[in-house]
């Protein structure tokens, strides 16, 4: 008997529209998640879906507060020995050229605030050496600053620049010999985020997005409020790790739910709106700190809004797309009826034929998948690894550009102010996101990512090479070059690099969410977000070692940008394509040419259908079948 091919999974087409196996559930063949058959499954045709999308935007403001809180909680202030007066015996400060005479500062320039939408920003601390906290004694790093003798003091006065009367540093005297503990506190939140992305991503693919979101909300309230009650820096750092872990679960599940609720044409813009809301939290953070005045009040005020998200237990449903992809048809049936009721649809007319199809499949056992399954694929693992390297490079080199720009703040009066510094980096991130909206609209996901990566590589290479050349010419009086010219070029390249690298990191995460199948979407997102966290982690590591190895750090990431430019060409284009639902869909989500074919031009790469025809040529020849005259393996010979 002749075998009839299965109908495509996605009637709308796409690169994975003909990759269904015989084991696929008939209901998966019937339902189009992106709106052709049932608009309320993946589209925004119903008012209930618009409400759910809005509910994923609101928490982004609270997340923005938490991400950028380190800029204020752990900012190292200017400090001097108590009783000596601020202008007489200055022991040390945190940032070169800020808040006083730069000639008296004893520490090195530090890095600015990160503009990553999910980063715990505030890598501004510096260390010089002193003793004096009420925490249990911890071993100090082997390297001590040359000015350690200036730290011969038992009580300090502080000049906090971040709008607070007291922060974590002034609370426990984390200066001089204890200044390295500030870096450990920064590590704790970032490491918590990294572990949270990896672990909660796997759990969300196994038990669902909704349980992970709700439990993350409960535990961030517990750990976040307990942080405000810390009695020493060790307790503070430990609790910040768990706060970051729970924050990662909230960020990850909301990102996945947002992607799975939207139709293809609106996924990117809805995701960018959430990024803009998080940036609003970044811009409002200085005002919130000035209002609170104390770090404990600020920490409590940042966490308390998550209480509103407890209402999500009764409001927010599980992802219908994930339920269908994992063959949990009983739960999917109840949720479809719930959506139908909320959208005031007629089950007999609007979704006719769907319920009988689901009834046939209720006996099927759920089929859940772990992210480890990608190891056995040919294309999917490659796509995820490429995006992991892109996000790692984007956020890693972002620190290099930021430190280079802020290294010239003594000569640029605008950057001597704490708030000017903060809002400069925040504005660069905002402009980067606005540019992403325009570029991705015209060039697509892959083209936009390639453009921003090329800009990042050019800015990095010019900063490393051209500035070296200008520095050599500035030694000669007749060359017309000067140090001021070099500084201006350095600041310009740094701004371009921060702009482009921020876009690379953000777009890599979004790209991964689109090309990773629904059954392992959170796991794939967790890998890319954790890679971004590793890139961010390089900043406090270099600060802990007093900026040793910074130049090598920049060179390594500059080389990575060149590798990433080549690897991006291997990625598929996901613009206006339906989301892959299972491993088979994701495996056949292969790349397309960067430029469209000209009319009548023979493509160099065969499509899946052509591969099947090609593989059958030898069988046909062996059985005596003859090919028409002028036929070739790729089609008919051009006359």
Image (spheres, rainbow, N blue to C red):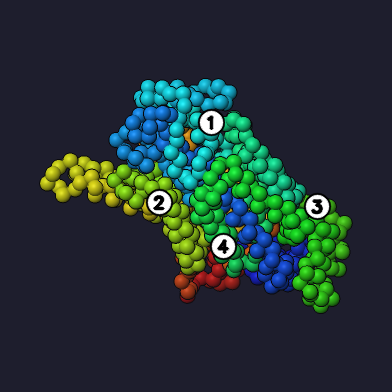
Q: Which mark is residue 583?
A: none
Q: Position of residue 23 (x, y in %)?
A: 77, 57
The mark nearer the N terminus, 1 or 2, is 1
Tag 3 near tag 2, CB within 8 Å? no
In the orientation shown, which residue stands out farthest toward the front? 83
Q: Earlier in the sequence, mark 3 or mark 4?
A: 4
Q: Residue placed at 34% from the left, 40% from the top?
A: 100
Disc 3 or disc 2, which is closer to the eye?
2
The circle drawn on residue 366 is 3
Q: CA distance from mark 2 to mark 4?
A: 25 Å
Task: Choose the circle earlier in sequence order: 4 or 1.
Answer: 1
Q: Nearer the viewer, residue 605 or 521?
A: 521
Alpha carbon separation for disc pair 1 and 2: 27 Å
Residue 420, label in figure: 2
In the picture provided, is 108 more to the left or to the right than 380? left
Q: Quadrant of residue 255?
A: bottom right
Q: Kindly check if marks 1 and 2 are in contact, taking CB atoms under 8 A apart as contact.
A: no
């Amino acid at each position: 008997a002749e075998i009839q091919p299965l109908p495509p999974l996605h009637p709308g087409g796409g690169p994975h529209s003909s990759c269904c196996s015989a084991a696929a559930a008939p209901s998966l063949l019937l339902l189009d998640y992106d709106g052709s058959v049932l608009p309320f499954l993946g589209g925004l045709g119903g008012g209930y879906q618009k409400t759910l999308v809005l509910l994923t935007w609101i928490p982004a403001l609270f997340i923005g507060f938490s991400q950028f809180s380190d800029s204020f909680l752990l900012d190292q202030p200017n400090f001097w020995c108590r009783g000596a007066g601020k202008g007489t015996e200055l022991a040390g400060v945190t940032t070169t050229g800020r808040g006083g005479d730069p000639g008296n500062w004893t520490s090195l320039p530090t890095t600015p605030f990160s503009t990553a939408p999910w980063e715990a920003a505030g890598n501004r601390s510096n260390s010089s050496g002193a003793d004096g906290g009420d925490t249990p004694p911890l071993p100090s790093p082997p390297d001590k600053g040359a000015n350690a003798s200036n730290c011969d003091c038992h009580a300090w006065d502080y000049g906090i620049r971040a709008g607070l009367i007291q922060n974590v540093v002034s609370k426990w005297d984390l200066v001089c010999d204890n200044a390295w503990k500030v870096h450990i506190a920064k590590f704790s939140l970032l490491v918590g985020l990294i572990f949270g992305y990896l672990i909660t991503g796997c759990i969300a693919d196994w038990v669902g997005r909704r349980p992970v979101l709700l439990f993350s909300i409960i535990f961030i309230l517990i750990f976040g409020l307990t942080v405000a009650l810390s009695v020493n820096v060790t307790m503070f750092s430990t609790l910040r790790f768990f706060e970051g872990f729970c924050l990662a679960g909230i960020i990850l599940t909301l990102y996945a739910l947002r992607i799975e609720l939207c139709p293809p044409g609106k996924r990117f813009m809805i995701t960018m709106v959430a990024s803009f809301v998080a940036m609003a939290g970044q811009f409002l953070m200085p005002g919130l700190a000035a209002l609170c005045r104390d770090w404990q009040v600020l920490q409590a005020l940042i966490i308390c809004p998550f209480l509103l998200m407890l209402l999500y237990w009764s409001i927010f449903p599980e992802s219908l797309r994930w339920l269908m992809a994992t063959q949990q048809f009983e739960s999917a049936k109840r949720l479809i009826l719930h959506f139908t009721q909320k959208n005031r649809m007629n089950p007999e007319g609007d979704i006719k034929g769907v319920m009988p199809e689901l009834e046939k499949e209720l006996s099927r056992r759920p089929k859940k998948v772990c992210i480890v399954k990608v190891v056995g694929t040919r294309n999917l693992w490659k796509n995820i690894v490429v995006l992991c390297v892109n996000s790692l490079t984007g956020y890693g080199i972002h620190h290099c550009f930021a430190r280079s720009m802020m290294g010239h703040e003594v000569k640029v009066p605008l950057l001597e102010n704490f708030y000017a510094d903060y809002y400069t980096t925040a504005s660069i991130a905002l402009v980067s996101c606005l540019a992403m909206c325009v570029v991705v609209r015209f060039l697509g996901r892959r083209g936009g990512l390639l453009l921003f990566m090329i800009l990042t590589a050019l800015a990095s290479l010019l900063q490393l090479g051209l500035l070296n050349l200008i520095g050599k010419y500035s030694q000669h009086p007749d060359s017309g070059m000067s140090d001021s010219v070099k500084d201006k070029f350095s600041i310009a390249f740094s701004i371009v690099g921060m702009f482009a690298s921020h876009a690379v990191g953000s777009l890599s995460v979004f790209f991964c969410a689109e090309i990773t199948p629904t059954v392992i979407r959170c796991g794939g997102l967790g890998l890319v977000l954790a890679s971004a966290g590793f890139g961010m982690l390089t900043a406090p590591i270099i600060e802990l070692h007093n900026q040793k190895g910074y130049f090598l750090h920049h060179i390594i990431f500059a080389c990575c940008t060149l590798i990433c430019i080549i690897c991006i060409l291997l990625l598929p284009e996901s613009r206006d394509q339906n989301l892959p639902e299972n491993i088979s869909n994701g495996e056949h989500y292969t790349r397309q040419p960067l430029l469209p074919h000209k009319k009548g031009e023979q493509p160099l790469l065969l499509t899946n259908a052509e591969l099947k025809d090609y593989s059958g040529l030898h069988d046909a020849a062996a059985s005596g079948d003859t090919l028409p005259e002028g036929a070739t393996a790729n089609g008919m010979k051009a006359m």
